[in-house]
Amino acid sequence: MAVRSAQGVLARPTSAGQTGPAEANGRDQHQSHCEPEPRPALAPVGDALFSARSIWLTRAGRAILQSVDIDIAEGEILTLIGPNGAGKTTLVRVLLGLEKPDRGTVRRKPGLVVGYVPQRFAIDRAIPLTVARFVALGRRVEDEDAKRALADVGADKLADRQLSELSGGELQRVVLGRALVGSPGVLVLDEPARGIDYTGEAELYALIGRLRSERGFGVLLVSHDLHVVMAQSDRVICLNRHVCCSGVPQSVAQHPEYARLFGTQVARALALYQHHHDHRHDLAGEPQTPSARAKDQA
Amino acid sequence: MAEPFLMRALLAGLGLAVVSAPLGCFVVWRRMAYYGEAVAQAGLIGIAVGLALSVNLTASVLAVTLAVSILLVALSRQQLVPFDSLLGLIAHAALAVGVIAASLARGPQLDLMAFLFGDIFAISASDLRWIYLGGALALGALVYVWRPLLSLCVHEDLAAAEGTPVERVKLLFVLVLALVVAMAIKIVGVLLTIAFLIMPAAAARPLSESPEQMALFAAIFGSLSVGLGLFLSVSFDTPGGPSIVLVLALIFVAAIFPAAVRGQR
């Protein structure tokens, strides 16, 4: 596994592994409560990739984000979990500048290249487009860079295929591959495993973890399910319109707010989660042989 | 065969076919057929205004299509009435207003058919200059926004997240659409303009492997339909605009048929 930030329970790391325990504990008091409370404004973190402070957003009279703070440090995998309607996608859109918050600030590291995998990427079959063309779309891309990105996600053989002919799993890999082009400093993945079966989902997250170790980018991952992302996440933020709790995955899984949001059943199942398959599936859902898996993990 | 009016009709039709091809592809990709329809039918108001004020019809039609195009962009942000209903509403309200105003402006002898279905054989040398000038402008603008426009057709959020100035590109696109629609109305009329935009592009889709190829095939099909349509029209004394659209429909069926048989999506 990759570098894992080694801070204490429920820490808010400023960048991987630099937060002192005392500082972290001071903030926990606020973070543990599930109602947004006035709290001392945190200064934006200097070397964070994204740093958002006191984000408020209301749509059609409904509060969607309430005083949300979030930082993504270089090289970390930060997972955003929360129930449906918790504002996860909206928060991502605010960070990317696709949506303007009513209040609050978003700071983005200058010159940061973002690789984005939007939620529910639907292919428009009305547009004839090869995979290679899609990968290079809208920007100047070196051939080598594009080839490497597709190879990294195991989609190099798809380059000349039409986008409209791809299966769901293939498309997923291609969209992820596209996000890798241009040496991104951060990948933003909004529920990238939608429509992929459970083991395929685990494979996808393992791939993301491996790419992070190789390329060193930060990752903001949105998921509705802590089970599969747990092993790959350095830090988890549980969102339900505001930040309910945050910290290393194990601590969030045991947090009372997490249990309250997802039900004690889920929380207990997670604690007991020691589930084995006698085989696995790759991203396209094809059964994978142990030798292929060994190669994959090498 | 080389009658001047026929040459002008052919040149006008071919010029329009070349500009309509890439534009029509974007109309298809962005699912804006009804948008184009509403803008085209609003052109009838422009004709009525032009007749009432005795100004150049091309100018008055262009002014109205540009204004309606921008109005529609603003209205697309409201959510109380679904946008397709709103487009239908505007298209037909414009048709009603246009027909009434045109008949009031000119009396019952006005040849409304020429405005509804176009009068390609009445294209004057000055019309032709306008069509080529406007066409060159539209084509230039399309080439200029081609890449960002294509990105946002594929995925708008992805394009925006990667720094495409989405709103500016969309606005430029609807302005180009309004410009081409204003030119096309003279040739194929307010009711057939959108057909001339989307039919070549739709026929090109099953044969194409890239966006540019689709635009190229659309241009070929559009030009072919102009040539064959005018030939039909002259040979059998059928109306020009509808003859062109009929040929386009046949080309579409021929193009989509093999794909449909193969069960290709």
Image: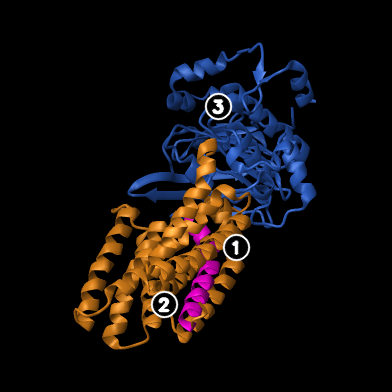
Q: Which residue is mark 3?
A: A226
Q: Amino acid at mark 1?
A: Trp
Mark earlier in primary sequence (1, 2): 2
User: Is B201 or B241 nearer to us in this picture?
Assistant: B241
Chain bearing mark 1: B
What range is drawn magenta here?
Answer: B4-30
10 Å crowding of disc 2: few (<14), some (14-19), many (20+): some
Q: Which residue is mark 2?
A: B121
Q: Say left or right for B209 vs B13.
A: right
Q: Which residue is mark 1?
A: B146
Is the same chain shared between marks 3 and 2? no
Can you say whether B68 is above or below A234 in the image?
Answer: below
Closer to the eye: label 1 or 2: 2
Chain bearing mark 3: A
Q: Alpha carbon of mark 1 to alpha carbon of mark 2: how far?
A: 33 Å
Tell me the quarter of the image containing the N terminus of chain A. Answer: top right
Can you say whether A208 is above or below A72 in the image?
Answer: above
Closer to the eye: label 3 or 1: 1
Q: Amino acid at mark 2?
A: Phe
User: Is A217 or A201 nearer to us in this picture?
Assistant: A201
Residue B24 falls inside the magenta stretch: yes
Q: Residue at x 46, y 27 (%)?
A: A257
Mark 3, secondary structure of its residue: helix
Q: The chain drawn blue is chain what?
A: A
Res. B46 image quadrant: bottom left
Q: Main secondary structure of the magenta part?
A: helix
Closer to the eye: label 3 or 2: 2
- Measuring from the top left, give residue A148's x and y in whole percent: 77, 42
In the rendered structure, the colour chosen for chain B is orange
Residue A100 in view, yes or no: no
Q: Residue at x 52, y 58 (%)?
A: B25
- Measuring from the top left, give residue A87's x and y in whole percent: 45, 41
